[in-house]
Amino acid sequence: MDSLKEPLKAFARDVGFDAVGISRPAPTTWEKYADWLAQGYHGEMRYLSERSRERRDLSRLLENYGSVIVVAKNYLTAHLAPPNAAFPFRPVVSRYAWGQDYHAVMKTGLEAIVRWLRERTDHRHRARACVDTTPLLERDFAAQAGIGWIGKHTNLLSRTLGNWVFLGAVITTLELEPDAPVAPHCGCCARCLDACPTGAFVGPYVLDARRCISYLTIELKGAIPRELRPLIGRRVFGCDDCLAVCPWNRFALPTGDPAFRPLPEIEHADLVDWMGLSEEEFRRRFRGTPILRAKRCGFLRNAAVALGNTKDLRAAPALVRALNDPEPLVRGHAAWALGQIGGEAARNALQRARQNETAAEVIEELNAALK
């Protein structure tokens, strides 16, 4: 059925994907992935280990599979303005979360490919659309399909798209001739490794997620380790530092998909404002965006850390109010942030907390910060 290969690729581009390739249906990096899990580098992301067998054997996802069709979609958008006099408490949000949730955007195009395959084969072949919620080693298959190579920062790199890409796949029972992989082009460059604020790279191609800011602000559900909080800066959802410094990005063009353009809530974001969000306001403002994944509790925890890292006394009133938040995690991190700002506000907060037996986490954090 190789007569369908080029029409399939043309259709994938027609529905909005920027690159498409065909991979062999067996992963080549499984052993490295299993070792990474054995080292515990995945932290609390238990879903990575619990569904690891599916990542090794695609028959658990689709019986009688024959090929993996891999697609990439560019999400590069214009830069957001840094903090300034008008927005002194502007947060940093990972670029992939500036617009609409990429899962929905990618799934729409992938499902269109699935329908195309079924119709073109008179329903003799089955297919399954996969975004990153499916246990699939996407980068492995994307590299096999010639879309790019896995860079030292563990993300996929393309000579034409850089690393600002979302990946998706369609597993199908249709057998197609696989494309040839491309040679890696990282050379001796180590900018991505050197750029990591928390030193999360064990070495080239190996990330300890437990120190990664994306993990700390999104996947981690409990308290952020104190020694890492000052290194997070103003980042409240993810981190792009290792991606942003890659030299291959100079060839990337801005995306033409309006779904990824910055939403007003991101473009005009303010940490002090976010610190006061109720559950209802959080869900309303970030409905349909990746930020919902952090949940209100985690998001306000992150906002408190970011405010503390500004060391700006003007942030103190919002943090003092957060000491009465219904979530202990938010209260504790707000107390830490007040300790970072220091001054009379932090000492007064500690005195009031000592009179409140229900605020043990506040006392603990303030004591530690004010020592």
Image (spheres, helix red, strand yellow):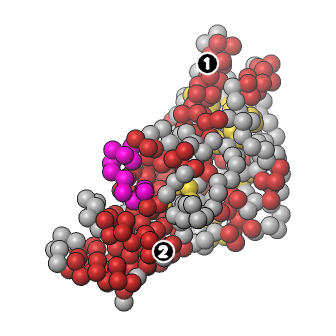
Mark pair 2, 1: CA separation: 54 Å
Which of the image's four quarters has the N terminus? top right
Q: Is residue 121 above or below residue 196?
A: above
Give the crowd class for mark 2: few <14, some 14-19, many >=20 residues within 10 Å: some
Q: Answer yes or no: is residue 8 visible.
A: no
Q: Residue at x 37, y 65 (%)?
A: 318
Give the amino acid at mark 2.
Answer: Asp
Q: Dividing the picture into quarters, in which one does residue 80 lie?
A: bottom right
Q: Dividing the picture into quarters, in which one does residue 198 lie?
A: bottom right
Secondary structure of the residue carrying numbered label 1: helix
Residue 175 horizontal side relative to residue 339, left or right: right
* Camera-nearest residue between 134 and 78: 78
Does the magenta segment cover residue 282?
Answer: yes
Q: Answer yes or no: is residue 262 visible.
A: yes
Give the amino acid at mark 1.
Answer: Arg
Task: Locate residue 76, reporting x and y percent.
Answer: 70, 46
Give the label, 2 or 1, closer to the camera: 2
Q: Residue at x 63, y 69 (%)?
A: 196
Dot 2 or dot 1, earlier in sequence: 1
Magenta residues, start to end: 273-283
Q: Dividing the picture into quarters, in which one does residue 92 lie?
A: bottom right
What is the residue that sits farthest to the front in this orientation?
86
* Camera-nearest residue between 21 and 81: 81
Does the magenta segment cover residue 200?
Answer: no
Which of the image's four quarters has the C terminus? bottom left
Q: Main secondary structure of the magenta part?
A: helix
In the picture of the structure, the residue carrying the numbered disc 2 is 312
Q: Residue at x 16, y 74 (%)?
A: 357
Task: Locate residue 181, reporting x and y percent.
Answer: 80, 44
